Image (cartoon, coloured by chain):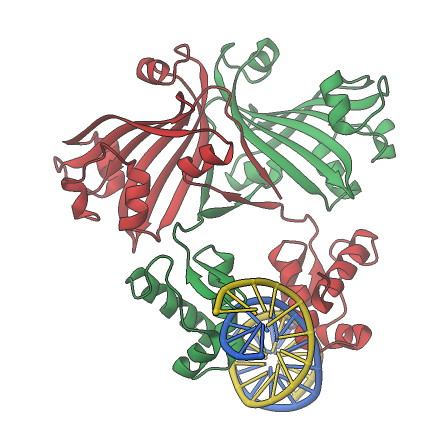
Chain colours: A green, B red, C blue, D yellow
DNA sequence: TAGTGGTCTAGACCACATT
DNA sequence: ATGTGGTCTAGACCACTAA
């Protein structure tokens, strides 16, 4: 579907690509552009706002709209629930709890969850399987302060992720992605050799500044996380 | 800074979190909300549009605005130029070319670049260093069809990434992130043991559907890619 | 001080999906 | 046919910031 603000945005994009305004160069103001395109100022404004949002141009009051010298490349990465990820591949999802306990976390975890020394938290280790094969290992700590229900929760039938999304649906999240060498337990649960290179995501989520959970998601050997931008 | 549409968005978010409209539930229409908040329809519309963009609600014509049953978690990941990434950490950036040549790529690479069998492409292997220590290894193929200048380009002084951003600034990109075990050359160049778990990003970029470049960025051992959403 | 982007308003028309 | 969101318009005021 082609609408005026999309057309304008595409035309501006084309002219930027063609070098009409070089990197660092200034585009005409919204008022000038609205005269050029014969549209309302709000319409070209929307086109420019989206280009700014995508990192193509940079806008400052009084200064105008300039082409970014080095375009900011940013991608949108959707992190689906692992169940949806597996089912989207046409595989059958299965969940297996390895162990769940109320224990005193190691000091590093305690500090990151904002817990007092010695305070216990819910620890869950579980496995997500695709067509019966290990797909992702989930090692999670849940703060009982942020989520009191975690003290009694039973993760025998359902993964803590889906459970938490219901308890605390809207959170801020810090994410780290990196590679690790499989330790003995990871190797056994993911059926790969010890020392194998595994892709791991660590996420810490907050609700109103209060740490809710800290989780390490370790994927089976060879897993590739894909996206497009 | 607090503006009406931000206030409305925050208030709607609060009420959704509080369970006023349960997952799957329908919010009042834009017209009703504009009466409730005493704002123009466009203002509540903007608030709702952003909530929709963030995956909190789902909007459909005639159907209304509903709270998503399982909120879509998506993050924005900015991939900075490695130079900026290093300098942002307060380290000194240095670039080192390992080798650059016009060669026939292996068949897999040829196919992905859309090159005829036997057609040569520019291959560049180079290293990005932070305070003199290896930080990222870049292994890149550039299609001469999409970027003729690549046939003669000299990457002695400047990395191919910065060069390419100038040649073809706006592209579509496919990205894969995963872990690999260091091979002999990677281990030597990144000064880590062979077999070490390394974080790698593979990017293929397109301009108007034409493949431009295929690159593997391998980070030093222990690198963590961070983001927040 | 002046010019730019950021936002809001009131109204209008259209696209779309259900009924 | 109807009610919803999606977009556009013309005009207005405000916030920021370089001159």
Residue B17 position, x and y percent, is 79, 52
Tell me the quarter of the image containing the C terminus of chain B: top right
Q: Which of B49 and A30 is in front in this view?
A: A30
Residue B218 position, x and y percent, is 39, 26
Tell me the quarter of the image containing the N terminus of chain B: bottom right
Left or right relative to A24: residue B11: right
Task: Residue at 84% x, 58% y: name it.
Answer: B20
Left or right relative to B31: residue B227: left
Residue A76 position, x and y percent, is 52, 47
Residue B91 position, x and y percent, is 47, 29
Task: Residue at 86% x, 34% y: name it.
Answer: A149
| Residue B183 visible in this rendered orientation of the protein | yes
Left or right relative to A87: residue A167: right
| Residue B144 visible in this rendered orientation of the protein | no
Q: Which of B193 and B30 is in front in this view?
A: B193
Residue A107's place in the image compared with A147, above or below, is: above
């Amino acid at each position: 579907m082609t609408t005026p603000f999309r057309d304008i945005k595409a035309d501006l994009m084309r002219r930027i690509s063609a070098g009409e305004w070089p990197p660092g160069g200034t585009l005409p103001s919204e008022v000038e552009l609205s005269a050029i395109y014969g549209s309302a100022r709000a319409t070209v404004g929307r086109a420019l706002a989206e280009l700014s949002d995508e990192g193509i141009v940079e806008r400052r009051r009084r200064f105008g709209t300039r082409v970014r010298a080095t375009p900011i490349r940013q991608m949108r990465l959707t992190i689906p629930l692992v169940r949806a990820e597996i089912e989207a591949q046409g595989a059958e999802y299965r969940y297996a709890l390895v162990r769940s306990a109320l224990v005193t976390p190691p000091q590093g975890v305690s500090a990151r969850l904002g817990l007092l020394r010695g305070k216990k938290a819910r620890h869950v280790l579980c496995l997500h399987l695709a067509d019966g094969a290990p797909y992702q290992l989930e090692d999670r700590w849940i703060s009982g302060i942020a989520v009191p229900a975690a003290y009694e929760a039973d993760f025998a039938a359902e993964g803590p992720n889906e459970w938490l999304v219901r308890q605390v649906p809207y959170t801020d999240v810090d994410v780290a992605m990196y590679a690790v060498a499989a330790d003995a337990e990871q190797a056994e649960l993911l059926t790969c050799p010890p020392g194998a290179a595994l892709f791991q995501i660590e996420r810490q989520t907050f609700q109103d500044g209060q740490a809710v959970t800290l989780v390490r998601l370790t994927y089976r050997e060879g897993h590739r996380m894909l996206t497009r931008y």
